[in-house]
Amino acid sequence: MKNDTKALLKRLYNGDRTATARLITLVENNLPAAEEIMEEVSKHIGKAIRVGITGPPGVGKSTLVDFFAKKLLSEGKRVGIIAIDPSSPFTGGALLGDRIRMREISCDERVFIRSMASRGRLGGLSASAVDASDILDAMGCDVVIIETVGVGQTEVEIAQVSDICILILSPESGDSVQTLKAGLMEIADIYVVNKSDREGADKLQREIEAMLEIQDEEKEKKVVLRTEAIYGKGVDELVDAVKEYFAKASAERLRSRRVRMAEYKILAILEGQMRQRMLSDGSLFKSLSEKVAEGEITAHSAARRILDKALEG
Amino acid sequence: MKNDTKALLKRLYNGDRTATARLITLVENNLPAAEEIMEEVSKHIGKAIRVGITGPPGVGKSTLVDFFAKKLLSEGKRVGIIAIDPSSPFTGGALLGDRIRMREISCDERVFIRSMASRGRLGGLSASAVDASDILDAMGCDVVIIETVGVGQTEVEIAQVSDICILILSPESGDSVQTLKAGLMEIADIYVVNKSDREGADKLQREIEAMLEIQDEEKEKKVVLRTEAIYGKGVDELVDAVKEYFAKASAERLRSRRVRMAEYKILAILEGQMRQRMLSDGSLFKSLSEKVAEGEITAHSAARRILDKALEG
């Protein structure tokens, strides 16, 4: 490892924000150093609680995250935030633009905020987001918030790389809970009805609760909260609910969550690197490609043979 | 194989458009039948020439494709068209909307047109597009056109699953050739300056030619054509250039192109199926995930071990 990378890591463990930003960029660009850096970083993680926050566009996520982070800061916590925007397929940039967000809290020395644009290709972004949250953990953050716009599978999956997932909805966010994709509803541990002073908030809350009653059965009761993020109302209750979740959650549950997180991390890295590895040094891949080109086998059976090898224990 | 699938395949080989559409949908939805269907279809492919057509939004691709297809029809050819739109990360639908396109030619019995939205996740779409072009080949199309909006890596890569690639630019499509991504320029075999009556067309053509002079060196000369698609001007010359390309191309060149196509097909299927396969029956994956969750190894090294297994010959 290069000496300047070593120096950056040392500064990271001391909570240096500039070094943190540079390490995230290094790893994001997938430089050869990435694996080595993450190997080192992984020795310093496991302390942070990872909170996934998701929801449709326009429900007030950023505002709520802002207040949520402020409350944690007031309790003496260090907070890291990774905000992921869906990217425009035309410009490659973030679709929601570089939102003027986190104005107040971003000045606080104990907050680290990173915006990332999702990149169309799944592996690339996810692996970066996961690595970034590990880096923020190693930096000394007590809580790492991963904020995504819950509109596509990509964003939903990123929210799974968390110890707890909060889904934010608002009365205006859609016609009804039924229109939300099943996958999006299931992943959450806490449900928030934001803009709860607006018309339709009661109805939305009832719909969520009705849906949870069908799903829950033997599982523990999930929480539905109401907030008015713009005034900071309900934020204390949200922080309490998160604490209570961890107080109540069984060790087995938290562990199975960590295993899922690990599975997801590995998949994200696999998907990000497979293409390059196959094309550069996949000897089985190369010989099978020749056979497909000659019409001896189909691409589907070639893919199956490669996957079968990768799956064997 | 189910009897109704067998019946669909029989109708496909007879050029039935309804059966073709249903088979593409079946394969696109990745039903268990997909691999089996493609296994059968692959015995009936290899006759069609696959033409990738790409370029930035607004250069007149659809109009040019329309005239290009008409010209081929007038020569008695059967034509298949796969039009891929980048999808909106919010709605999941096609960003450019269901364009009212191919009005005239879509009524012709010898044309089959399929629109697909790219889906954010790479594997899903690409594998579908590749399978669809195989199905159109098996249907009896002499030419299969794969039309993509060349704005992201996904679209560019899909254009590579073709025997010849045509890049369409227009004087208004960008400030200059230099602003185009290197990868986008390199893939093309034929360059078209559309809207060639507009100001800047001469300059654009000179820029493309200058760039090709730098790149070409020992390789065969690439063609730069001018068209005014809206009036059908230059389309005959484009069709001639495509024919000339195949008349001149060495067997070795065409073969290496087919190998690249095979590589790409396999990668697309791998990327589309890996996640599901790993989570359902990846024993190595499962045991490594446990180790990552326990902090024994990093996700990066777990991913590397799995990839190493998949790479061995």
Image: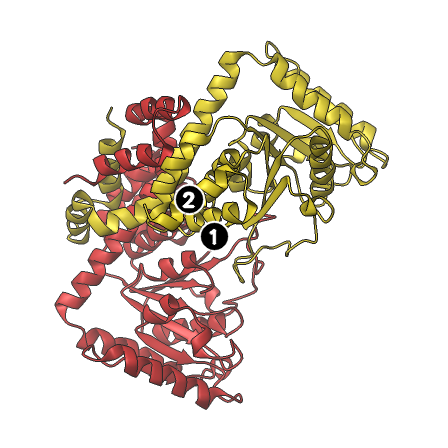
Chain colours: A red, B yellow
Quadrant in the rendering for residue A313: top left
Mark 1, Cα crowd under 10 Å, few <14 / some 14-19 / many 20+, is many
| A16 shown above or below A287 | below
- Determine the residue positioned at 41% across, 24% down: A293
Q: Residue B69: where, in percent of width, then height?
A: 69, 36
Q: Quadrant of the N terminus of chain B?
A: top left
Residue bearing mark 1 = A118
Can residue A172 be seen by looking at this rendering? yes
Q: How many marks?
A: 2
Residue appearing at x 31%, y 48% in the figure: B275
Quote the CA–CA distance across marks 2 and 1.
Answer: 16 Å
Residue A281 rendering spot, x and y as whole percentages: 32, 25
Circle 2 crowding by C-alpha within 10 Å: few under 14, some 14–19, many from 20: many
Left or right: A5, with A118 as reference point: left
The residue tagged with tag 1: helix, strand or loop? loop
Instruction: State which chain disc 2 sits on.
Output: B
Chain under numbered label 1? A
Residues A219 and B2: in front is B2
Locate the C terminus of chain B and report the quarter of the image it occupies.
Answer: top left
Query: Residue A4: in sight, yes or no?
Result: no
Hey, what amino acid is under mark 1? Ser
Q: Is residue A33 above or below residue B277?
A: above
Secondary element under disc 2, as helix, strand or loop, is helix
Residue B25 position in % (x across, y down): 47, 51
Residue where numbered disc 2 is placed: B123
Camera-side residue of B241 and A176: B241
Which mark is in front, 2 or 1?
2
Q: Quadrant of residue B206?
A: top right
In the displayed structure, B251 sits above or below A147; it is above
Say which residue appears at 64% left-offset and 34% top-offset: B180
- Residue occupying the point 44% across, 90% down: A202
Q: Is residue B279 left or right of residue B153?
A: left
